[in-house]
Amino acid sequence: MPSLKVGHGVGITTLALALLALTGTLVWALHDNTTPPARQSAQQSGPEPAVLRSRLPFHPLLHAPTATSRRVYEARQRLITRCMTEHGFRYEAPPVDAAPSAEAGSGPAQFGIETLNLPNSADRPGTQPAERPRGKAFGRALYGDPQRKISARNKEITVSRPATGCLADAERRLLGEGGPRRALTLQLRLDQGERDALRTLGKDHAFRGATARWRSCMRQAGFPAAKDPQRLAAALRPDTPLAEQPAARADVTCKRATGYLERAYARLAVLQRRWLDANPQPAVEWRSLRQREGKAATKVLDAG
């Protein structure tokens, strides 16, 4: 898999993207008189995908915004604003409402199209407004020397961050000297663990059984070529709303009818816990850095 370089203006965030789904009515194409299992179960209530994702062991490490992460966000923006003012620039920080909160965010979807509820467009990848160009001097003050970076990688992605400039100064103030580089390294180590657990899931007997039941449901719905939810989602037409694509509607309905997501996330949770038990140090050190960052953020905010 090719390496991915993340731009210098991107914060340390989760590196994965969620696929979205719209509501729709499943049109069944049956060749006999049997009642498709999804028809009766399509409207059954069950745990929302966000709830299932929140139960994963990696969720509190990488994907759960908290009151502390909100304080860190506010402190970072305050430090950047002061630094930019000292350089003679007016820095317009994103609104506080854009900060992480304990109620927002549930981590990336892992199994294709997972929800019947379409989030607000502002929550969709790629829909955030582009940063307004402010000139080279502004960018240099904020992001520092473009030739000086800190970077880290795991087996699949590479992430780079500024080593100088107001953004980097704010990160060092909150994480300590050497803290930003270490935080980036630890995050990518944990990200790799999350990826490894998902890859191992493909060999799990219980998960393969859940996929077989979903596949049977999809055959009854008229989609005999559907192999698994991830490949189905990847094959959908990006220029057509999901609600207008019968395969997408069938996918969501069959997941509910067979309890696919509940089973898939339960097995993934087991494998994530197994990885963390075998590799405890990254999580321990990651929490320690986050605690230090939270305490430093509180001091910045208390100082006014």
Image (cartoon, rainbow, N blue to C red):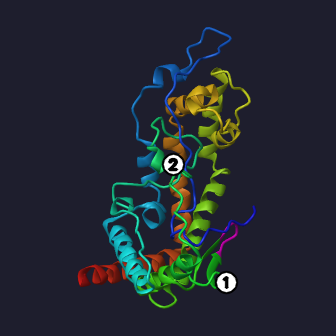
Residue tagged 1: 147
Residue drawn at x 34%, y 71% as measured from the top left: 74
**Secondary structure mostly seen in the magenta stretch:** loop
Characterize the local packing of mark 1: few (<14), some (14-19) or many (20 or more) Cα atoms within 10 angstroms.
few
Q: Quadrant of the N terminus?
A: bottom right
Residue 131 placement, left or right of 216: left
Q: Label 1 sits on what residue type?
A: Gln
For residue 34, the mark is: none
In this rendering, the label closer to the viewer, 1 or 2: 1
- Picture residue at 52% right of the left edge, 82% below the top: 141
Residue 124: which disc?
A: 2
Instruction: Characterize the local packing of mark 2: few (<14), some (14-19) or many (20 or more) Cα atoms within 10 angstroms.
Output: some
Residues in magenta, as a range: 153-158
Looking at the picture, does residue 299 appear above or below residue 1?
below
Query: Height in image: 78 above or below 25?
Result: below
Indicate the position of residue 196 as horizontal and vertical percent values: 64, 62
Task: Choose the circle earlier in sequence order: 1 or 2.
Answer: 2
User: From mark 1 to mark 2, how far is it between C-alphas?
Assistant: 31 Å
290 part of magenta stretch: no
Instruction: Kindly check if marks 1 and 2 are in contact, taking CB atoms under 8 A apart as contact.
Output: no
